[in-house]
Amino acid sequence: MKSLSLFALLIAAFASAQDIPSLVNSELPQLVSTYKELHEHPELSHQEKQTSAVLANALRKAGYTVTENVGKYDDGTPAYGVVAVMKNGSGPTLLIRTDMDALPIEEKTGLAYASHVRSKNQAGDDVGVMHACGHDIHVSTMIGVGETLAQLKNQWHGTLILVGQPSEETVDGAGAMLSDSLYARFGRPDYAIALHDDASLEAGNVGVVSGPALAATNSVDVTMRGVGSHGARPEASKDPVVMSAEYIMAIQTIVSRQIPPQAPAVVTVGAIHGGTKRNIIPDEVKMYLTIRSFDDGVQKQILADLKRTAEGIALAGGVPSDRTPIVMVMPESSPVTYNNPELADRLRAVCVRVVGAQNVVPSHSEMVSEDFGLFGLEGHQIPTVMLRLGAVAPEKVAESKASGKPLPPLHSAYFVPLPEPTIRTGVIVMTASALDLMSK
Ligand SMILES: [Zn+2]
Ligand SMILES: [Zn+2]
């Protein structure tokens, strides 16, 4: 009896190894055509009406209980979040997330299925729209993962929560879904996983980072207030242009002198606006900053340093006390994307098993940011991992290495992911990861 059940187990293990790739192969033509359809019809953050409907319909057809319009933004407007749940007895709860939004970029790839969409952004400007971050790859992959796991229902137990998150590019979509009681309504996951395509990695490859994968980011607006005057009468002014120049140079030493060298961090002033005319000293100058690090504590320290330095420069410049600088942390912020090392090791082993060790590459953390980390809740309570999915044609990677010419990065008008084998690899590794985490 014992040897018989062992035999059955071996058969099941063999069947599962066989099943995923063949199931994915049969779904692939449809997934690629969905991908091209999504690529041609991208939607900006906060506007993912059709994209969310494509995802919702496909998962409903695959047997999931689907809820649409999950999420509420801070200003009270509704979000196009999709939650697809499949309950399969008692067992772990796994959340898998895809994002859905595109970017205000005019596509220049020249692809047959390139986007010609134009749309109004939140400021009301008419802009070209492009899936330049590959979220169309992610949605297509999610549909494949949903379909495959539904067909392999006898190989896992627990609750599967597939999340279509809106507005990743404006980093307010995950927060919108969580504040709409995502976990209270659909269940709190034991793990949350996701993938993101990688514009420098060969299609067919997967990268896994342990620990911090993407940076925490805060957007900060600094208003250096002074006292305006005629340009010929500087003695009557408290010149905010000069104080801003001092400020920008002074904050360059935050990273080099105040943050421990072991903690990488970035302080960038991306925009500065002030004044109207050569001979007028303005009343104020505004600066727009992004700050990044891999540690929420370092973020807090940089914010404090930015405020103290601004106040110090105003004090030194003799600015009256009712005109002290305003340092504001904007809502466009997100925590570090932290890959739980234990879970990352476990999923790396799964990837090696299903795509081969030669296709699982060591990956490194990057200073770009994402709001996926929010699904792990404050203090990384829920283990999360985001995998990197190679998306570039191998010959392009080789060409770039030989010529030294960099490949178009994510958010470039020239970014061309290779749908196959990118989607195929994505579906295989995510499905296998889910089966491993929810195995019977
Ligand atoms: Zn992006
Ligand atoms: Zn992205």
Image (tube, rainbow, N blue to C red):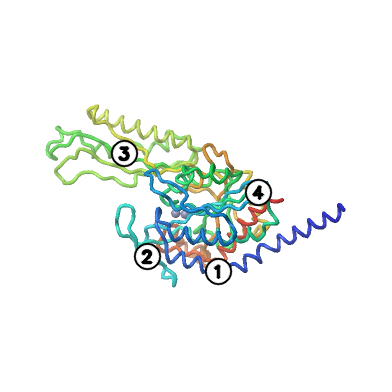
Question: Which residue is label 3 attached to?
Answer: 222
Comparing marks 3 and 2, which lies closer to the viewer? 2
Disc 4, disc 2: CB below 8 Å? no
Relative depth, front residue between 87 and 175: 87
Across and down, in percent, residue 230 comes to: 12, 39
Q: Mark 4 points at which residue?
A: 158
Question: Distance of mark 4 from mark 3, alpha carbons?
Answer: 48 Å
Residue at 37 percent across and 44 percent down: it is 75
**Does residue 335 lie above or below 53 as drawn?**
above
Residue 3: percent from the left, percent from the top?
86, 54
320 in relation to 349, above or below: above
Mark 4 or mark 2, earlier in chain: 2
Residues at circles 4 and 3 in contact by the CB criterion of under 8 Å: no
Q: Can residue 134 be seen in this view?
A: no
Q: Can residue 186 be seen in this view?
A: yes
> Cβ of disc 1 within 8 Å of ligand 2?
no
Q: Of circles 3 and 1, which is in front?
A: 1
Which marked residue is nearer to the observer: mark 4 or mark 2?
A: 4
Q: What residue type is labelled 3?
A: Val
Q: Distance between the residues labelled 4 and 2?
A: 41 Å
The residues bearing labels 3 and 1 have C-alpha atoms spaced at a distance of 49 Å
Going 42% across and 37% down the picture, which residue do you hit? 256
Q: Is mark 1 on a helix, strand or loop?
A: helix
- Locate residue 41, reporting x and y percent: 42, 65
Query: Which corner quadrant of the image does residue 146 belong to?
Result: bottom right
- Frontmost of labels 4 and 3 is 4
Mark closest to the chain's N terminus, 1 or 4: 1
Q: Residue 30 carries which label?
A: 1
Identified at 29% across, 55% down, the residue is: 124
Comes first in the chain, label 1 or label 2: 1
Determine which of the numbered discs, if any, sits on residue 117 in the image: 2
